[in-house]
C-alpha cells in the first residue's frame, strides 16, 4: 500500500489527531468565506469548517462517523497532526469550493450544505452487525472495480451477514471482513484492527519491504554499478544515482525506492520536497544533463508515497508541458459508472537544468501506487520513454480510511487514474514495452539482471 513508505495521500486527513466536538449547522450558518458545512463530491465525506477547526465526517447511506480533524494555520489552510497541509479555496457564489492536499495531486470538489446528515447527529450502534453494515456499505458505495475484479459484492453480503450476530467476536468479525475482500487481490484494500492487518497483493507478485529493498540495492551495487564512475545516495537512502561505465558509458542510473521517507519520521511534506530538490539539483546539473545519452530510472522495488513528489520529478525530465494523466473518483453510491469530472494533472517544465533525452523505466509487480502513477506520468513524456521489466502492481488511487463503529478500520480505493485514451491500468498494472524477468530466484542465483541489461541496450540503440 501507499503507506509502506510514507503516509498515504488520501489518509492524511484520516490519520490526523483526535477529533474535536462536531459543529452544528446552527453554530456555523451564515459565516463568510469557507466556514460552514460541505459535502465532498465522491469520497463519502462531509466537512465542517468552524473557525480554527476542520472536522471530517465519514458517511454512507446508513451511517455517519466522525473522522479526524485539522487545525487552521492561515486563510483557507489547515494542518493535520502528521504535518500535511490542506487548502480550501472558495468558488464563485460561495456555494462551491475545492480541497487540495500538498502531498497529493488534483483537487476535490465541495458543495455547501445547510445541515449535517441526520446520522451525524445521533450515536451509531457499535454491535457487530452495525459494523458489518458500515463495512459493506463503505465498499458498495465507493469501490470502483467490482466488475473488473469479477466480484459480486451483493452476494458477499448475502453470504456473510447471516454469520454475524450479537455474540460475534472481534476476531471472528475480522476474519469475515478479510474473507470478503480477499477475492479483490487489491493492494490498496486492507482491514485493520489495532496491530492486526489483512492486506494482499496481486497474485504472482510480492509486496515491497525494507528487507527486499536492502537485498536488491546491494545486488545492484555489486552487479550493475560496480564500475560506475560516480555513485551517491540521497534523500535518506531512498534515491541512488550513478554514472554508468562499460557498456552503459554515457548513461545515468537513477533508483527510486519510494516517493517519500526522504527526511525524518513525522517531517511535513515541504521537508521531504526540499530533500528531493537537493538530490535533483546534485544529479541533474547542467553539465550532466547535456552529456547524458540516456537515463535508466529504476522503480522495480518502489513502495509508493506521494504522487506530488512523482510529478515534481517528472517536471525535471521535460522541456515541454504535457498531461501526465487525468484523475477522477467514483461519485454515486449505487452506480459505479458515475464519476467526478476527470481532472487533468499537468507536468510543467521546472526551472533550471532538465534532462530531456531518452529514458528507460524499469518496473515490476513490486512497483506500487505512487511508483505507478509516476510511471504513468512518463508515458506521454516528450523525449521518448521505454518501459522494461514486468507489469506494475495495478493500484493507483489515493486510499480512503473508513472508521467502523466498533473501532476497526476499512481501507479502500475510490479513484481512477486515466491515460489519454480514458483507460485505467488498475488491476493489470502498466505493461512494459520490453518484458524481462525481475529479481527472480534464477536471476539472483546466476547474478543476472536481465531488465537492467536490456535497458542499457535499448538506450544505446536509441542514442
Image (tube, rainbow, N blue to C red):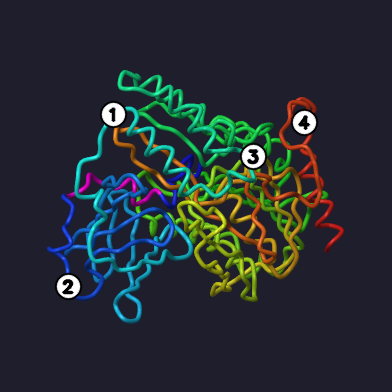
> Label 1's element?
loop
Magenta span includes 249: no
On the image, the x and y values in percent for residue 84 come to: 35, 55
- Cα–Cα gap, marks 3 and 2: 47 Å
- Mark whose residue sits in front, 1 or 4: 1
Q: Which residue is mark 3?
A: 150
Relative to 187, does residue 455 appear above or below in the rendering?
below
In terms of depth relative to the viewer, which is nearer, 221 or 155? 155
Marking on residue 443:
4
* Residue at the spot 84% in from the left edge and 51% down from the top edge: 457
> Label 3's element?
loop
Q: Which residue is mark 1?
A: 127
Give the magenta range.
11-20
> Label 2's element?
loop
Upstream in sequence: badge 2 or badge 4: 2
On the image, the x and y values in percent for residue 52 come to: 18, 62
Amino acid at each position: 500500500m501507499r503507506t509502506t513508505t510514507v503516509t498515504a495521500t488520501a489518509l492524511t486527513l484520516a490519520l490526523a489527531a483526535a477529533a474535536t466536538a462536531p459543529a452544528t449547522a446552527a453554530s456555523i450558518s451564515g459565516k463568510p468565506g469557507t466556514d460552514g458545512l460541505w459535502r465532498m463530491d465522491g469520497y463519502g465525506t462531509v466537512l465542517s469548517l468552524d473557525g480554527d477547526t476542520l472536522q471530517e465526517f465519514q458517511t454512507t447511506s446508513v451511517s455517519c462517523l466522525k473522522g479526524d480533524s485539522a487545525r487552521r494555520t492561515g486563510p483557507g489552510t489547515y494542518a493535520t497532526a502528521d504535518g500535511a497541509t490542506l487548502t480550501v479555496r472558495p468558488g464563485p457564489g460561495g456555494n462551491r469550493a475545492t480541497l487540495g492536499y500538498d502531498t497529493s495531486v488534483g483537487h476535490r470538489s465541495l458543495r455547501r450544505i445547510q445541515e449535517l446528515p441526520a446520522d451525524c447527529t445521533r450515536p451509531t450502534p457499535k454491535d457487530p452487525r452495525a459494523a458489518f453494515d458500515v463495512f459493506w456499505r463503505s465498499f458498495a458505495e465507493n469501490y470502483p472495480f467490482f466488475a473488473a475484479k469479477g466480484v459480486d459484492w451483493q452476494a458477499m453480503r448475502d453470504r456473510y451477514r447471516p454469520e454475524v450476530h450479537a455474540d460475534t467476536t472481534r476476531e471472528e468479525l475480522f476474519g469475515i471482513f478479510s474473507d470478503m475482500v480477499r477475492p479483490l487481490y487489491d493492494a490498496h484494500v486492507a482491514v485493520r484492527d489495532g496491530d492486526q492487518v489483512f492486506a494482499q497483493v496481486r497474485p504472482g507478485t510480492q509486496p515491497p519491504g525494507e528487507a527486499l529493498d536492502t537485498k536488491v540495492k546491494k545486488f545492484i551495487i555489486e552487479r550493475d554499478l560496480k564500475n560506475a564512475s560516480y555513485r551517491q545516495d540521497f534523500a535518506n537512502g531512498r534515491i541512488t544515482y550513478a554514472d554508468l561505465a562499460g557498456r552503459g558509458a554515457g548513461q545515468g542510473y537513477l533508483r527510486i525506492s519510494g516517493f517519500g521517507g526522504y527526511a525524518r519520521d513525522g517531517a511535513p511534506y515541504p521537508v521531504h520536497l526540499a530533500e528531493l530538490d537537493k538530490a535533483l539539483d546534485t544529479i541533474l546539473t547542467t553539465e550532466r544533463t547535456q552529456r547524458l545519452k540516456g537515463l535508466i530510472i529504476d522503480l522495480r522495488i518502489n513502495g509508493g508515497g506521494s504522487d506530488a513528489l512523482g510529478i515534481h520529478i517528472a517536471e525535471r525530465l521535460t522541456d515541454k508541458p504535457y498531461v501526465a494523466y487525468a484523475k477522477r473518483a467514483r461519485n454515486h453510491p449505487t452506480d459505479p459508472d458515475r464519476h467526478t469530472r476527470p481532472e487533468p494533472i499537468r507536468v510543467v517544465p521546472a526551472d533550471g537544468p532538465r534532462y530531456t533525452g531518452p529514458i528507460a523505466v524499469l518496473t515490476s509487480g513490486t512497483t506500487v501506487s505512487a511508483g505507478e502513477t509516476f510511471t504513468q506520468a512518463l508515458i506521454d513524456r516528450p523525449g521518448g520513454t521505454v518501459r522494461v521489466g514486468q507489469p506494475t502492481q495495478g493500484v493507483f488511487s489515493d486510499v480512503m480510511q473508513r472508521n467502523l463503529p466498533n473501532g476497526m478500520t476499512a481501507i479502500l480505493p475510490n479513484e481512477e487514474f486515466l491515460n489519454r485514451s480514458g483507460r485505467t491500468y488498475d488491476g493489470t498494472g502498466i505493461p512494459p514495452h520490453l518484458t524481462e524477468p525481475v529479481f527472480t530466484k534464477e536471476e539472483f542465483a546466476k547474478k543476472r539482471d536481465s531488465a537492467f541489461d536490456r535497458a542499457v541496450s535499448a538506450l544505446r540503440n536509441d542514442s
